[in-house]
Amino acid sequence: MAAYAHENLTAVTKIPTPYNEPVLTYAPGTPERAALTAKLTDLSARHHDLTATIGGVQRPGGGDPVDVVQPHRHKAVLGTLHNATQDDARAAVAAAREAARPGAPSPSTTGPRSSSRPPTSCPAPGAPP
C-alpha cells in the first residue's frame, strides 16, 4: 500500500497487478470467431435509432433524419440519426456548462463530483479482484 500527499490531495492506493487479456486469433472454427459472427449478424439484422446524449439524457436530434450505412456496403443501413439543430447545440452547451460547475452532480453517479480527491483504486475493466 502506498500513500501520497501533495497539498490538499491525499490518497491511499493499492495498485492492481497488471495483466494482459488473452490473445485471440478469431481463426475459422474457433469459438471467438463464432461468437463474433453471431453478434455481427444480430446487430446487422436490427435497425438502430442513433441518439445524442445531452445532460445525461438520450434523445434524437431535432433535425432531418440521416441514414448511417456500412462503409463497404452502402445499401446496408445500420441506423438512423437526426441532425442536430441550433436548439440541440444550445442544450448541449448548457449541459456542458452545468457539468463543469464545481460540485455539479454527474449523470453517471449519484453524488456530487469532487475534483480534489481521486478514487482510492482504479482497477482496469475485467481485472481480477
Image (cartoon, rainbow, N blue to C red):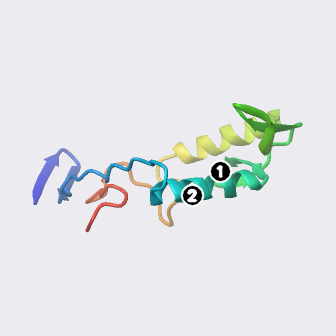
Question: Which residue lies under the disc numbered 2?
Answer: 107
Write down the residue under mark 1. 55
Image location of residue 37, percent across then percent down: 59, 53
Q: Can you tell which mark lies on residue 5?
A: none
Where's residue 110, x and y in %?
51, 66
- Residue placed at 26% from the left, 60% from the top? 120
Spatial separation of the CA atoms under disc 1 and disc 2: 7 Å
Q: Is residue 105 at least partly visible in the picture? A: no
Q: Secondary structure at mark 1?
A: loop
Amino acid marked by disc 2:
Pro
Q: Is residue 95 above or below residue 1?
A: above
Q: Name the residue rendered at 36%, 61% in the picture.
A: 126
Front position in the image: 98 or 47: 47
Mark 1 in CB contact with mark 2 (< 8 angstroms): yes
Could you tell me the amino acid type at mark 1? Answer: Gly
Q: Left or right of 112: which side holds 2?
A: left
Task: Specify few, some or many for label 1: CA neighbours under 10 Å numbering under 14, 14-19, or 20 or more.
Answer: some
Quadrant housing the N terminus: bottom left
